[in-house]
Image (spheres, rainbow, N blue to C red):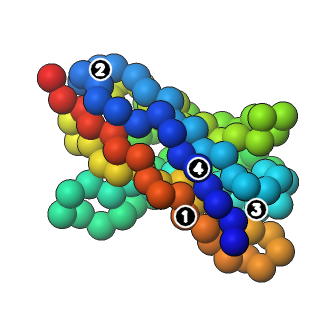
Amino acid sequence: QVQLVESGGGLVQPGGSLRLTCVPSESIFNFAAMGWYRQAPGKQRELAAIITSGGYTTYTDSVKGRFTISRDNAKNTVYLQMSSLKPEDTAVYYCNFRRVADWNTHWGQGTQVTVSS
């Protein structure tokens, strides 16, 4: 069973920045796609950003220009750098990796991001 460990959430003021980190229990090279989803209270979980094994990135419109997803192969880590944060970015953020070997997706436990003054 793949384990994904997230960290970096917290409380930040509007306009501030946070960096989320997701570390898998096996090599990052075992995954075809690595993404960050978020779920706000009373809303469905939505994709925020995704990066493929080839480095291709996709962002939902509401975060384009403010969020950056990246990977560090040496540290076996995927990041979500969030800037110019808005109250509507408040949500639980989950990392989600799709494993090449079985094409199954795996979820982290979630990390809370709260944007409030």
Q: Which residue position holds label 4?
A: 5
Disc on the earlier residue, 1 or 2: 2
Q: Nearer the viewer, mark 3 or mark 1?
A: 1
Residue depicted at x 69% and y 52%: 24
Is 86 located above or below residue 95 in the figure? above
Query: What amino acid is labelled 2 in the image?
Result: Gly
Residue depicted at x 55% and y 64%: 107
Q: Residue furthest left?
A: 117
Query: What amino acid is labelled 4 in the image?
Result: Val
Q: How far is mark 4 from mark 3, CA to CA?
A: 18 Å
- 68 displayed left or right of 24: left
Is 82 located above or below residue 100 in the figure? above
Q: How far is mark 4 from mark 1, CA to CA?
A: 9 Å
- 8 displayed left or right of 13: right
Instruction: Point out the image quarter for the N terminus.
Output: bottom right
Dividing the picture into quadrants, the one containing residue 85 is: top left
Q: Residues within 10 Å of mark 4 (few under 14, many from 20)?
A: some
Q: How far is mark 1 from mark 2, CA to CA?
A: 28 Å
Q: Nearer the viewer, mark 2 or mark 4?
A: 4
Where residue 42 sits: x, y (%)?
Answer: 18, 63
Q: Which residue position holds label 3?
A: 32
